[in-house]
Amino acid sequence: MEPVFRTLEIAATLAVRATGTRITYQGLEHLPASGGAVVAINHTGYVDFLPAALAAMKRKRRLRFMIKAEMAEVGIVRWLIRHTGAIPVDRQAGAGAYAAAVESLRRGEIVGMYPEATISRSFELKEFKSGAVRMAMEANVPIVPVIVWGAHRLWTKDHPKALGRNKFPITVRIGEAIAPTGTAQQLTTTMRSEMTTLLHTAQDTYPRPDGAAFWLPRRLGGTAPTPAEARAIEEAELAERARRRRGERS
């Protein structure tokens, strides 16, 4: 029994009810009832993790998330990481987190991670990092593709939070488990293809606004940046961070 994790599950369930959020789960049966698995989730906002974790809870599983190490600088987050089995990731030196994740998978845990690494401003899939497939192959566990759609309306980059009682619908679509076979490149291609299909289905069946909306991809008539525009914004941000680091060292 993990009392902290259980408390968080209850709090999350109550928060969903209090805000009137309607979460629809599709494909829950694809989350394994036992044994290790890498749960690959798309990343469109700051609360994607919550619907994914609640989906795992419905299968009586607990999702161990890989989380940015800098979040551990916040006292309460550091405490939660220690008590929920989350895996802090230092992007400058990720070997320790990688080894910890593989060990968790071998123990039969399900580990949640974002193959895109950072939030997609375009709300389309970005390029994938190799960590998810490498971990699955090393631990010899399947990859379960998961798409969360609608949670970005609550809180995402470049837009104010909307965490009140907005009654936004959220869709969680879970695809069939992908066996860790073939090369890393082949497995990445398969995972991306499956997640693209799941994403487009979730988007196509989600209630559409009458006009343009910031949370819709440009492809669907929204005002979100195109993937190319989003990439340019990120590159400018990285360049600015590098400039500031150089300034700090000088």
Image: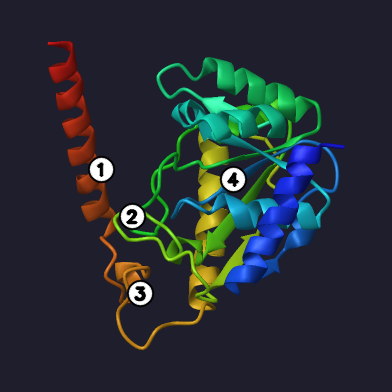
In this rendering, position of residue 131 left or right of residue 24? left
What is the C-alpha distance between the residues marked 1 and 2? 9 Å
Residue found at x 51% / y 44%: 189
Regarding residue 196, the answer to whether it shows in the image is yes
In this rendering, position of residue 175 left or right of residue 69? right
- Along the line of sight, the residue nearer the viewer: 160 or 206: 160
Dot 1 and dot 2 residues touching (CB under 8 Å): yes
The amino acid type, in three-letter code, at marker 2 is: Arg
Residue 4 lies in quadrant:
top right
Res. 220 mark? 3
In this view, the mark in front (1 or 3): 1
The amino acid type, in three-letter code, at marker 3 is: Leu
Tag 2 residue: 121
Tag 4 residue: 40
Crowding at dot 2, Cα within 10 Å, few <14 / some 14-19 / many 20+, comes out as: many
- Along the line of sight, the residue nearer the viewer: 213 or 78: 78
Tag 1 residue: 234
Which of the two labelled residues, at mark 2 and mark 4, occupies the earlier sequence position? 4
Secondary structure under the numbered disc 4 in the rendered image: strand
Which of the two labelled residues, at mark 1 and mark 2, occupies the earlier sequence position? 2
What is the C-alpha distance between the residues marked 2 and 4? 18 Å
